Image: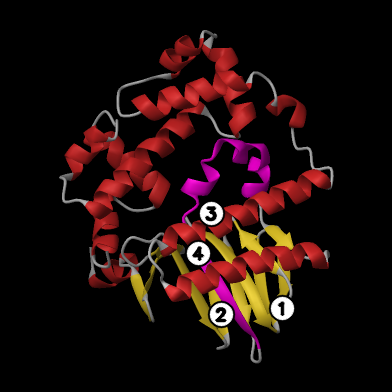
Amino acid sequence: MDNNASKALAPSRSRFPDGFRIMRGKHEYVTYIEHASLRIWYSDIPWHFESHTHSAVEIIMPLKGEVVYTLPERVYRVQADEALIVPPEHAHDLVMEEGSSRYLLLFEPDSIFGMRDMQLISCLLKSPIYITGQPAFQEKVRQLLTQTVECYERKDPLWNSLCYSYLLQMYVLIGQHYAQQGFQHDAGQRRIDPEIVDSARLYIDQNFTRDISLSDVSAFTGFSKYYFSRIFKQQLGTSFSEYLRQKRLSMAEDQLIHSRTPIQEIAINAGFGSIATFNRVFREARNCSPSKYREIYGDYI
């Protein structure tokens, strides 16, 4: 590979007050300070971030002026009394012009989105949420975001968890608000046999590091794999195989970042049958190899 090609593949780094913004192509690898999975920036400097994706949820809260977000389905001109929530892996760019200011929040959503009753609003969690047009509701959401920012800036003991408690309250508020407005996405289907999925999720969570299959889990619930597979996807909005894959990837990512365990051992620990399978699945999901992922995050943990 020539030098120009090597440079094209190398991740780019931009320095920020509390860390780095690391880009590889159009994918951003969000870095966090130690023992945290949330970052918040204030800025009043005109800025343009080109279209990119990342695994974090992004929330913009303008304080003055506006911030313009361009997503595949829509352009949002977010004003100073509004907020916009962009879900993970959703391509977007943003522009903030002269005379504007904002807070931008990035956080990893697993601990919130993984809560069982959050699946009742799973389609909301997968789409941009524009907090606009309802002043009283907007104010409540922004109050919780302001509390999150203040907690982040103070850095009291267990501040990361406290920040997440405010974000969880925000999602509860949003979910309840949409329910009161008559939001019913697949409501009839999502009430079908909830105990099947509840027991299956518990079984998967306790056994995902083993060589388990759809047949194993459906047999555990007492239903055919075809019926179980359909109900699982109806209630959770994701397939059994994708749910299992995400559980294994999350464990592998944690070990890559926080341990020196050999990558082959990590693959086995997380339930992947071979290092080849692990490398392929990881690259498909995170757009880089496990070793590159460890290299990117290992520099800044």
Q: Is tag 1's residue or tag 3's residue first in the polypeptide sequence?
A: 1
**Callout 3–callout 4 Cβ contact below 8 Å:** no
Out of 38 and 289, give the one closest to the viewer.
Answer: 38
- The residue tagged 4 is 106
Three-letter residue code for mark 2: His
Residue 246 point in image, percent of width and height:
42, 39
Label 3 to label 4: alpha-carbon separation: 10 Å
What is the image's colouring?
secondary structure
Q: Quadrant of residue 233?
A: top right
Residue 288 visible: yes
- The residue tagged 2 is 48
Q: Which residue lies at the image location 37% right of the left edge and 27% below the top edge?
A: 206
Q: Which residue lies at the image location 45% right of the left edge and 26% below the top edge?
A: 202
**Callout 2–callout 3 Cβ contact below 8 Å:** no
Residue 259 point in image, percent of width and height:
20, 51
Residue 262 point in image, percent of width and height:
15, 45
Q: Which residue lies at the image location 59% right of the left edge and 32% below the top edge?
A: 236
Label 1 to label 2: alpha-carbon separation: 18 Å
Out of 276 and 131, give the one closest to the viewer.
Answer: 131
Vertical comparison of 20 with 270: above or below: below
Q: Is tag 2's residue or tag 3's residue first in the polypeptide sequence?
A: 2
Q: Which mark is residue 80?
A: 1
For mark 3, give the secondary structure: loop
Vertical comparison of 89 with 267: above or below: below
Q: Which residue lies at the image location 53% right of the left edge and 72% below the top edge?
A: 149
- The residue tagged 3 is 88
Residue 137 point in image, percent of width and height:
77, 62
Vertical comparison of 278 with 170: above or below: above
Vertical comparison of 23 with 268: above or below: below
Horizontal arrangement in the rendering, residue 88 relative to residue 295 (left or right):
right
Label 2 to label 3: alpha-carbon separation: 20 Å
Out of 283 and 57, give the one closest to the viewer.
Answer: 57
